[in-house]
Image (tube, grey):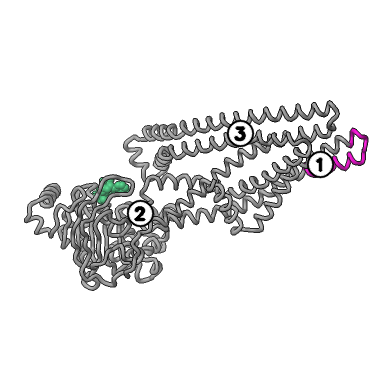
Amino acid sequence: MRDLWLGITGVLGSSWRASRGRLLISAFLMLLGNVSAPLIAVFLAVTTDAALARDTSAAVWAAAAVAVVALLSLTMEHFAHIFFFELADLHHLRIEREIGDLAHGTAGLDQHERQDYADRMELLRKESWEVAAGVQTVLTAITLSVQIALTGVLLARLEPWLLLLPLFAVPPLIAGRIGEARLERAELATAESRRLGWHLLELAVSPAAAKEIRLFGLQRTLRERQAAARRREEIPLRRAELAGLGLRLAGQLIFAVGYVAAVVFVVRSAITGERSVGDVVLVITLAVQTNAQAAGAVAVAGALQRNARALARVRWLRRESAGSADPVVPDHPVPATLRDGITLEGVAFRYPGTDTDVLRDVTVRIPAGATVAVVGDNGAGKSTLVKLLCRFYRPTAGTISVDGVDLRRIDPQGWRERIAAGFQDFVKLDAPARESIGVGDLPRIADPVAVPAAVHRADAQVVVDRLPNGLESHLGKSYEDGEELSGGQWQRVALSRAMMRDEPLLLLLDEPTAALDPLTEHALFERYARSAREVGGRTGGITVLVSHRFSTVRMADLILVVADGRIAEAGSHQELMARNGLYAELFMLQAAAYR
Ligand SMILES: Nc1ncnc2c1ncn2[C@@H]1O[C@H](COP(=O)(O)OP(=O)(O)OP(=O)(O)O)[C@@H](O)[C@H]1O
């Protein structure tokens, strides 16, 4: 009930802020149309009695009034629609902006990688137009209530017993509500299959996936899986819809019993002469309208509930975004330079909504100015470590400190502004090349010196030289004249982006060179390491490289071998080789493979 109320006030408040003129005009038109409907019955009754009394003039005037109110009743809602559409557009924009703001507004990644968040986001995106059109639902509900009240007064004036007639409209309403609740439960329960279905459809139309799909002959399998996912979604949904339909039908039958009883009651009193024929016409017309009102009320109650639920999801999103804030308030500025370095002490981490620690008891000191390589098997926890350093997540146990200050006490936004990063799953940003690179340091996005310098540092000049208009060329298929780059070329663009911040405290390279050949990766990393040491000498900045290629990582000052969520070994290449442990074994294996 509270959600319903908050939904109604939320929609009205938001429409008022979006355009109070349009809201008032559409409310007036809706009210005029809705009040006119019961007046048709009143003027019809007057027309009938005047005709039977042979009062031609009164009959003509009353008939004219019937025509006018019938016209108003039929047309006003259509005129109101013009304003509804405009309001819905404005409202939709606001909602999309808010969803975008809230989704972008969280400091970490915990929501984005959570299943229930993804489910609700999916529903919210689906419903955003319905919420936008909510103002029509709310105004229909309000003006329909006025119409029902007026009908009630007219019936009560004739015979108070007839007031029971609208009461018969209650069972269809309740039945509608139960049906809606069932449907929502089914929607939530099938969200996973819906997502899977969409994912498979996206794969079918994605150029990136087309190669593997054709090569491995996956078309049929994927189509079957998509159909199965759709079936898994559709069967419970259809069942819930059918159950809702049955409930509504039962409710309407109860109403029909009341309707027939009311008509029989009035016709009998007309036969005995207690009432006029006009009264019979009045009741029959109003009773028909009551039926339509009940059906309208059921539909509008369902729409109000969907609207309320969607707005409750927006409120949930707001709470989640607010709740994701770390209870530890950042009260420390980001250091200008690193003196001591970054220390991890007893760090453990478990992804939200899961029950296993993917990092355990990680204790390590990364000295200021150092170049650190992180190696380990797939799924060992390397990228998770990088995400913790970016402060996308908070450790579930232990602390990460920067020059002795807990990272949680350092402003996350400020900290990230001092991080430069390149990831394996980098963004292919469709934009002019200059911007696709320049966003790596937004204040210098169009800087005529910084962007080419970043390209140079990433050794990506060869990519830019091949573009028809150099840095001004459009990249990506969103543009008609956009250049589609190869995987390795996109990677160099992403690396240039990572190089935009020229004095970072932390340079994170999480397999950003995986699409490049080992020799190029080696040469690139040597170059980064040299320039990182230079920068590190001035600022104490740390470079962290995640790579599976041991030939590349051997030059790092410190190598961390991650195995099963723990730091299994730590030291320089020489130290680890002398130790003859896991690192030495993996290094020898890879070296033998390359020989
Ligand atoms: N968002 C997530 N939610 C839940 N579990 C996750 C998430 N991301 C990663 N994991 C799990 O955490 C573990 C470590 O993953 P991580 O990506 O850190 O490994 P990695 O060492 O970087 O692997 P790779 O070399 O394959 O990139 C894996 O078991 C993975 O399944």
Find residue 111 and report its horizontal and vertical position in percent.
38, 51
Callout 2, which amino acid?
Answer: Leu
Disc number lying in front (1 or 3): 3
Q: Is residue 335 magenta?
A: no
Q: Secondary structure at mark 3?
A: helix
Residue 229: quadrant of the picture: top left
Mark 3 to mark 2: distance in Å? 46 Å
Name the residue beneath numbered marker 1. Answer: 67
Direction from residue 179 to residue 519 in the image, left or right: left
What are the residue bounds of the magenta stretch?
Answer: 50-70
Q: Majority secondary structure of the magenta segment?
A: helix
Name the residue beneath numbered marker 3. Answer: 171
Which residue lies at the image location 53% right of the left edge and 30% below the top edge?
Answer: 242
Residue 109, disc: 2
Mark 1 to mark 2: distance in Å? 62 Å
**Disc 1 packing (10 Å; few <14; some 14–19; many ≥20):** some
- Residue 285 visible from this viewpoint: yes
Residue placed most toward the observer, 235 or 487: 235
N-term mark: 1 or 2? 1
